[in-house]
Image: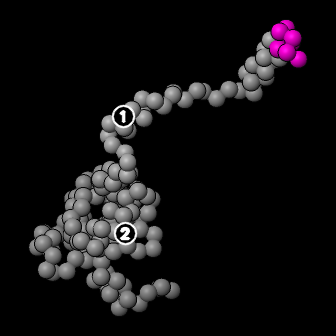
C-alpha cells in the first residue's frame, strides 16, 4: 500500500526543486550515470524535512538529493537554515546514488564552514589544544590493584595508618 498519492509526491517533489527564476535552474542537469560516491557537487538546499534536508543538485530525474541528519553536522544546522532561506549554492559530497529510483544521498560533512563559537579565536584554540594533556591509557583491574597495594605499603611504612 502506497503511503502517498502520486499527486502528493508530485507536489512535494516540486517544492523541493529550485524555482525557474533561480540562477541554478539554468544549469545543465546531471546524469546519474556520471555521479559517483565521493564526488563533490553544488546544489541548493531547498527544504528541511523530518530526518534531513532536500538538496536540488540538478539531477536529470528532477528528484532532489536527500541529506540525512547523520550527514549534517549538528553545529552546522544554523548555517543550513540560512542556506534554505537565502537559496544560495552549497557544495555537498555524494554518498550514495540510486539509479533505479533516480535519487542520491549527499553529505554536508566537511563542506559547510562552521560558525566560530563566541569568544574563541584561532590563536586561543591553538593554545587550548597545546594545553590538553595526552590521554593516559586505561589501567586494567590488576594494575589498579597493584598500585593500591603499593600505596598501602608506603602509608604503612611511613606510619600514616
Quadrant of residue 40 within the rendered picture? bottom left
Quadrant of residue 124 within the rendered picture? top left
Q: Is residue 102 above or below residue 115?
A: below
The stretch in magenta equals: 155-161
Front residue of 129/91: it is: 129
Residue beneath disc 2: 53
Can you say which quadrant of the picture contains the C terminus? Answer: top right
**108 displayed left or right of 139:** left
**157 displayed left or right of 56:** right
Which residue corresponds to the image point at 47% horizontal and 85% vertical from the top-left? 2
Q: Circle 1: is it few (<14), some (14-19), or many (20+) Cα within 10 Å?
A: few
Q: Is residue 40 above or below residue 49?
A: above
Quadrant of residue 130 within the rendered picture? top left
x, y percent for residue 30: 19, 66
Q: Which mark is residue 126?
A: 1
x, y percent for residue 5: 41, 90
What number of labels is visible? 2
Front residue of 85/65: it is: 85
Amino acid at each position: 500500500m502506497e503511503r502517498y498519492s502520486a499527486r502528493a509526491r508530485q507536489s512535494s517533489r516540486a517544492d523541493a526543486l529550485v524555482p525557474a527564476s533561480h540562477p541554478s535552474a539554468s544549469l545543465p542537469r546531471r546524469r546519474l550515470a556520471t555521479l559517483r560516491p565521493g564526488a563533490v557537487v553544488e546544489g541548493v538546499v531547498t527544504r528541511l524535512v523530518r530526518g534531513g534536508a532536500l538538496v536540488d543538485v540538478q539531477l536529470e530525474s528532477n528528484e532532489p538529493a536527500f541529506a540525512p541528519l547523520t550527514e549534517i553536522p549538528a553545529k552546522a544546522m544554523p548555517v543550513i537554515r540560512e542556506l534554505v532561506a537565502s537559496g544560495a549554492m552549497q557544495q555537498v559530497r555524494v554518498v550514495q546514488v540510486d539509479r533505479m529510483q533516480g535519487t542520491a544521498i549527499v553529505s554536508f560533512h566537511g563542506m559547510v564552514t562552521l560558525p566560530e563559537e563566541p569568544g574563541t579565536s584561532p590563536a586561543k584554540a591553538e593554545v587550548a589544544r597545546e594545553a590538553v594533556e595526552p590521554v593516559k591509557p586505561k589501567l586494567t583491574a590488576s594494575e589498579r590493584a597493584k598500585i593500591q597495594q603499593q600505596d598501602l605499603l608506603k602509608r604503612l611504612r611511613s606510619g600514616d595508618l
